[in-house]
Image: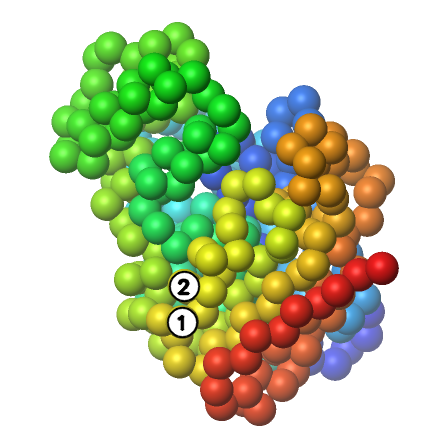
């Protein structure tokens, strides 16, 4: 919360897929991207709330069962946190910000909330099974394992659990996460965004190894009046990085590396001047 007594806009920040905590970190790899984003937004006069998903970080508990988790669980939680923010005395309007998989959670929650804006950062435009397929190919995973992944994903898309999973793919398709995947795979991000009725900002980095610029363009295209911002040189964790895969991935464990300079500026500008953007606008931010 920014200092002072004046009313301020607020943003609920939703993290990406897997055991990513509220700061944007994976176990054993700290980059602090969402923590840094929250601090930067506060400096711009915007309050923010970031949360640990169920089963992650401070939200871990012995009662949590991964096999009971569904995509709707995250949506319901997001809606509850929006209502919490809306009840705060100094909050004058609440926006939802989703990063990576969190972008889809934010999109679906936005369909059921009264929001001042929707911010999607590094959000995929295609169903998760297709995104996984292209990510495995980009990572040069052996062809046989890519075929196994397609077979498993196809079964889960049909609502059929899979008992035989190669050890190399166990982390992705372990039995306890298959119910969640079956609830996630049928969802189409671009189609769901077309149903939301909120001012929308789509932000995408040009050196993101997990989601591409075309994803951002497809998302922006389905929302009339949306704003598309391409941040030159920004990777998936919102930091400036080389397009070289090895060098890019090194930043995932560099918590002191600052965020891309104009990221929070793009968000604060959107929240302050969103009604002045009647048509779709693409802005490319370049860094030296």
Q: Residues within 10 Å of mark 1 (few under 14, many from 20)?
A: some
Q: Which residue is mark 2?
A: 218
Quarter placement of the N terminus: bottom right
Mark 2 and 1 residues: CB-CB less than 8 Å, in contact?
Answer: yes
The local secondary structure at tag 2 comes to helix
Q: Is residue 26 above or below residue 49?
A: above
Front-most of 98 and 207?
207
Q: Position of residue 105 (x, y in %)?
A: 41, 53
Q: Which residue is located at x 19 percent, y 23 percent?
A: 161
Q: Which residue is located at x 24 percent, y 10 percent?
A: 164
Q: Which residue is located at x 47 percent, y 65 percent?
A: 217
Q: Position of residue 198 (x, y in %)?
A: 42, 76
Q: Position of residue 132 (x, y in %)?
A: 39, 35
Q: Which residue is mark 1?
A: 221
Q: Is residue 35 visible?
A: no
The local secondary structure at tag 1 comes to helix
């Amino acid at each position: 919360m920014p200092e002072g007594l004046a009313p301020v806009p607020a943003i609920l920040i939703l993290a990406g897929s897997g055991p990513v905590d509220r700061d944007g970190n994976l176990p054993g790899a700290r980059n602090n991207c969402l923590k840094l984003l929250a601090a930067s937004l506060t400096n711009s006069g915007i309050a923010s709330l970031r949360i640990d998903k169920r089963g992650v970080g401070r939200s871990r508990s012995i009662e949590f069962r991964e096999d009971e988790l569904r995509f709707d669980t995250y949506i319901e939680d997001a809606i509850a946190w929006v209502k919490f923010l809306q009840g705060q005395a100094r909050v004058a309007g609440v926006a939802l910000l989703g990063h990576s998989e969190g972008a889809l959670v934010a999109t679906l929650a936005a369909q059921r909330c009264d929001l001042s804006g929707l911010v999607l950062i590094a959000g995929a435009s295609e169903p998760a099974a297709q995104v996984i397929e292209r990510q495995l190919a980009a990572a040069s995973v052996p062809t046989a394992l890519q075929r196994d992944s397609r077979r498993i994903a196809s079964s889960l898309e049909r609502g059929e659990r899979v008992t035989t999973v190669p050890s190399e793919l166990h982390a992705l398709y372990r039995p306890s996460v298959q119910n969640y995947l079956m609830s996630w795979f049928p969802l189409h991000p671009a189609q769901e965004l077309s149903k939301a009725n909120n001012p929308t900002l789509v932000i995408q980095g040009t050196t993101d190894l997990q989601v591409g610029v075309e994803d951002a363009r497809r998302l922006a295209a389905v929302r009339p009046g949306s704003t598309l911002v391409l941040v030159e040189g920004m990777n998936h964790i919102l930091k400036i990085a080389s397009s070289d895969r090895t060098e890019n991935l090194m930043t995932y464990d560099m918590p002191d590396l600052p965020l891309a300079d104009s990221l929070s500026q793009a968000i604060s500008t959107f929240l302050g001047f969103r009604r002045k953007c009647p048509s779709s606008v693409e802005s490319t931010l370049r860094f030296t």
